[in-house]
Amino acid sequence: MSTYRSRATSSESMLDELFGTSGLEGDLPPTEPDPGFPLRPFAAAMPMDDLTVTEPRTDESPAERLFRRAMEAASRGRASEAIHRYRELLQLDPSHVSARNNLSQLLDTTGDPEEALEQLTAALRVTPDDVHLLVSRGAINGRLKRYVEAEGDLRKALRLSPESMNAHLTLGMVLWRKGMAMPAAEALRKAITLEPTHAGAHYYLGEALNQAGDYRNARAALERALELAPAQGRTLRLLGRVLDRLKLPDEAQVMYRRARDAGDT
């Protein structure tokens, strides 16, 4: 089966899913315009593949061809076309887990997290112990503040794969958003043990420790995050606040100035 193409395969991207640390507005525009099926309302009814031969014949099955074309459309920024192709594919093969996973990513990105969850749930009915799918669903539920559902998926993922860095990272952020600062810090420390150079994990560990009032260790976590990603404005701003709480106003002012220079990164 084809491999997943999901943001959840990247632990950095998981931060975006849960906390919106980067937005679509700042992304580079696609090199080609989205065909936009609503602008061509009858396009879906036309046998477009059979009108002209635009590529060599291969031994691809119809499902394989649709999957390839959906991935190509997504890679070119044509989300509407990719969603349409995945839906066509799932009509042919409802058990295609990779298609459901990729469709869920596109739906979540384009503003439909509810259907994204439905697609992940359908995929998990086919492969209920898929750690990647469990973490993806946990991430979306966490962002929607459905913490019980999110924590259930993530703890199951960790029972299946105790060394899953993404699962520990996502669980830590869910617990942090619930206001459980010390359990969140424990999960984030485990994520860092598994991937020591993950700047985002150090940053959120700093957030959790700051929330818990452990300013000394919060400072250490944030300073490590800056070593790994020096120009992060949010890290510099938080470190400035932590230094203020440690009664180090001069050092805090240095961080605030650096944060202004870095901008909203």
Image (spheres, grey):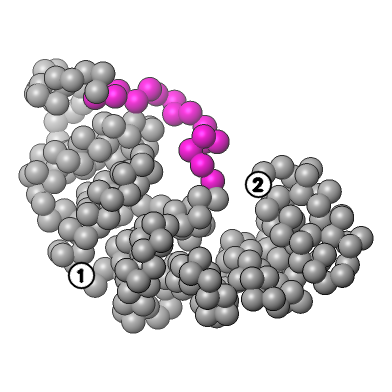
Q: Quadrant of residue 242?
A: bottom right
The image shows residue 73, relative to residue 204, as above or below, that is above
Q: Residue at x 24, y 24 (%)?
A: 37
Left or right: 94 in relation to 220: left
**x and y percentages locating residue 80 in the rendered image:** 29, 32
Q: Which residues are magenta?
A: 22-37
Question: Which residue is more in the foreground, 95 or 211?
Answer: 211
Q: Answer few, some or many: residues within 10 Å of disc 2's Cα (few below 14, many 20 plus, some between 14 and 19).
A: few
The quarter of the rendered structure image containing the N terminus is bottom left
Seen at 63% across and 66% down, the residue is: 207
* 167 to the left or right of 243: left
Tell me: residue 258, above or below residue 77.
Answer: below
Q: Which residue is mark 2?
A: 265
- SS at mark 2 in the image: loop
Towards the viewer: 250 or 67: 250
What residue appears at the point 28 percent right and 50 percent down from the top-left corner? 114
Inspect the image, locate mark 1, and give the three-letter code of the amino acid beneath it.
Answer: Pro
Q: Is residue 43 magenta?
A: no
Evaluate whether residue 191 shows in this view.
no
Q: Which mark is residue 186?
A: none
Mark found first going from the N terminus, 1 or 2: 1
Q: Are marks 1 and 2 in contact (CB under 8 Å)?
A: no
The quarter of the displayed image where residue 32 is located: top left
Numbered circles on residues, count:
2
Distance between mark 1 and mark 2 Cα atoms: 37 Å
Q: Amino acid at mark 2?
A: Thr
Q: Say which residue label 1 marks.
A: 128
Residue 44 vs 170, above or below: the answer is above
Find residue 170 and report its horizontal and vertical position in percent: 45, 67
